[in-house]
Image (cartoon, rainbow, N blue to C red):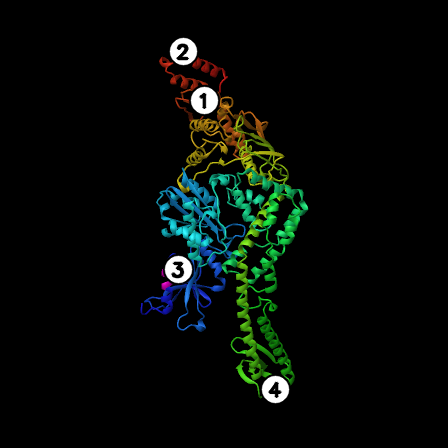
Amino acid sequence: MDNISPMMQQYLELKDKYKDSILFFRLGDFYEMFFEDALIASRELEITLTGRDCGFEERAPMCGVPFHVADNYIAKLIDKGYKIAICEQTSVPSESKGIVQRDVVKVITPGTLIDANMLSEKDNNYIMSICMQSEKLGIAFADISTGEFRATELQGNRILDKLIDEITKINPAEIIMNSAIMNEIDIKFLLSTNTNAFVSLYDHNAYRKNKAYKTVTDHFKALTLEGLGLDLHEISICSIGALLEYLKETQKNSLSHMTRLDYYSSEQFMVLDKSTRRNLELTETIRDKRKKGSLLWLLEKTNTAMGARTLKSWITEPLLQTDEIEQRLEMVDDLMKNILYKDDLKTLLKQVYDLERLIGRISYGNTNARDLIALKNSLAVLPDIRRILSCMHAKKIEEIFNQMDPVEEVKNLIENSIEPTPPISIKEGGIINRSYNNELEQLKEIIANGKKWISNLEEQEKSVTGIKSLKIGFNKIFGYYLEVTKSNYDLVPHYYIRKQTLANAERYITPELKEVEFKLLGAEEKAVELEYQLFQEIRDTIKTYTKRIQNTALSLSVLDAIIAFADVSELYKYCKPTINKDGVIQIKNGRHPVVEQTMGNNMFINNNTLMDLQDNRFSIITGPNMAGKSTFMRQVALIVLLAQIGCFVPADEAVIGIVDRIFTRVGASDDLAQGQSTFMVEMSELANIINNATTDSLIILDEIGRGTSTYDGLSIAWAVIEYISSKELVGARTLFATHYHELTELEGLLNGVKNYSISVKENGENIIFLRKILRGSADQSYGIQVAKLAGVPNLITERAKDILKQLEEHDINNKKKKKVSKTRTEISHQDKQLNLFNYKDDVIISELLKINVLEMTPMEAMNTLYKLVHWVKGDVK
């Protein structure tokens, strides 16, 4: 170590403290990386790898990036999952004796980004903390760029599935967790296959109850946590405390902008699992993972980044409380009845910057004068917004009006202190209004007079010397100088002092010029230092208004999201739904909100829907592929979801009974990453539905059982219908699409089961999809016709017709093997067939097997016989 240079010793000491991070080590105008960090950075950033003599036997691998463009390189590394430790010079080189002092001022991780150019303005960037103790899970997550901070707890059966549902809903960029959860066998596998988040273990001590309790109370300056709603949620306290500890450790910041904690429970929102969010394409499409074509794409007509983020969170968390839903609907209704007000509000909101992230950067000390001007301009439109809101009548709009604080003090402070068009840099002057501070005004006067004197001096010297080409210039090395071209050397006065010789000119100074330069440069340096000092004071003053500005930002984001609902509802002619708690879902001429718009030209065929908790619990829908069964079922689910997020719905009329969960089993695909076949995925999703559905749920099932053999699939589908339709077992409102026409026999056998079909018009050998849902069942699947429509060659479809005809002529229950046409294909069947069409026989036999005749009284025997006779007659279901 004796031969190692002092600078490298400094580097190694800091690197030892941040072993899990790439250390950006500030050297002059560059951030340098060494050893393994350099190898990684040069590879990932595709920059040149060099070396440096540091006292080792071999040169240390080294690469670097200019500090003024470092953000671009840091963003690339963060996107690849690396953590970056930023090491800055903490002492002024000119004032330092020996080596310049350096220290890590911040650790940037995927979940702790705050710079605007590293973030998507319409998406939150969450970091999540997970704590497992005593078969409970505490979850806390935050977006430090906005100050949002939320927490919840999970417990009960299938707790890891619930955790994955929360993770996929929140979509964090980074997850930290305690060691206890890593003991769960499936957790690493589940996280690796369900999230792209950067996952790491964090100090177990930070998750200890007493440590976490103190961290949380200290941060929120509270004596107890009762006021935060956490007194009964110990596991959440542990996850919150650890997250705060981690953020303070990495950000080296007080996090003063994280002023509010929102604790929520699953009872507040509709539960949407990963499969449902994917199948309903709420925020991205299934096929290409793009926003276009999703529900979010349709609704995202917001005017601010804050509103866009709020809208996205509403889509993933539909409401369950009727009064909250109706408050949002009332706001939408009020705006639609006052279109001119709505349009004026949109115009004003377009002038509002991202207040949440602006105040976040201000609180962080990571802001510039242009940010303050953006804040001032945003606050300036608030009086006009409040004036319009005061003319409206919805109760929630009145609340928004009262919550929207114009914060006049901040607007006036910025207006009086900051130049209207300041530069980006805050350390080079030109950002503070000269009239804001007396000392600054005096310095600016000296600067102005000095520059004027120098300008006058140039004209004066031209006149005195007769050198018309003479000019006064400036550089950082020589300061101000008089430059004379070679052809005019003989006219140079004796009192000019030569300072520098160029190829075609000489540069001179005079005692008088140097005296003015001294005063001028001294004043400029003092002015720049004073401006920076004043800017810091202004920024710190604004920080004291953080909570008020955040409340205003929240009210604006809600207003913006509601205006987006009103815009969509007006543009696409949606209706206001009636919300009820009795379970009735009745939709007249409903449309799929997204498909309707992608088709265009009013080509979408609307349909009616009737579901309740009594006679219309379970709808079996038959019809050919491509006819619209899946679209119709998704349409019903999306209309319910739209109503419960407080938006009008695509229908002529709609009555929506509150749904606690929407489950979907739509489509089939192998999950090779998890080693699961199509059928295994199907059955896993079905098991999730069966185990978690309640009477208040809405279930969408498409082609259950098609991933296995015909009779296995039919048996499973049959049993599923029995189970879900039973009031005693589930009794949920269900839409069930199938090609098993045998299942239509269940109408009349099971209470609440009704048959529906997609209408099809035959035109010779071709079919036309009418896409209308009608009562009754389809009599065939039109599979060959659909294959023809899909472009399957005629040779195949014609051969299929021949095979189908011969199959229909055969008794498929015959145990003998029979040849089909002129091929060697043989058709075989199981010796034992399911008694699907003699359903009552199975029930009667089952009942008879339970009877012990010798122990029955004559009256019991008569009652049992009476019951069985009426069962056969169909009087009992």
Element class at badge 3: helix
Q: Nearer the viewer, mark 4 or mark 2?
A: 2
Q: Is there a contact, CB below 8 Å, between mark 3 and mark 2?
A: no
Q: Which residue type does callout 4 highlight?
A: Leu
Tell me the chief SS of the magenta region: helix
Q: Nearer the viewer, mark 1 or mark 2?
A: 2
Q: Which residue is under mark 3?
A: 37
Q: Nearer the viewer, residue 611 or 204?
A: 204
Q: Which mark is residue 836?
A: 1
Does the magenta run of residues contain 13? yes
Q: Is there a contact, CB below 8 Å, between mark 4 and mark 1?
A: no
Q: CA distance from mark 3 to mark 1?
A: 68 Å
Q: Which residue is under mark 2?
A: 858
Q: CA distance from mark 4 to mark 1?
A: 118 Å
Q: Earlier in the sequence, mark 1 or mark 2?
A: 1
| Badge 2: residue crowd in 10 Å (few <14, some 14–19, many ≥20) | few
Q: Earlier in the sequence, mark 3 or mark 4?
A: 3
Q: Which residue is under mark 4?
A: 491
Q: CA distance from mark 4 to mark 2?
A: 142 Å
Q: CA distance from mark 3 to mark 2?
A: 90 Å
Seen as rendered, the residue at the extreme bottom is 494
Q: Which residue type does callout 3 highlight?
A: Asp
Q: CA distance from mark 3 to mark 4?
A: 61 Å
Q: Earlier in the sequence, mark 4 or mark 1?
A: 4
Q: Earlier in the sequence, mark 3 or mark 2?
A: 3
Which quadrant: the N terminus? bottom left
Span of residues in magenta: 12-17
Seen as rendered, the residue at the extreme top is 858
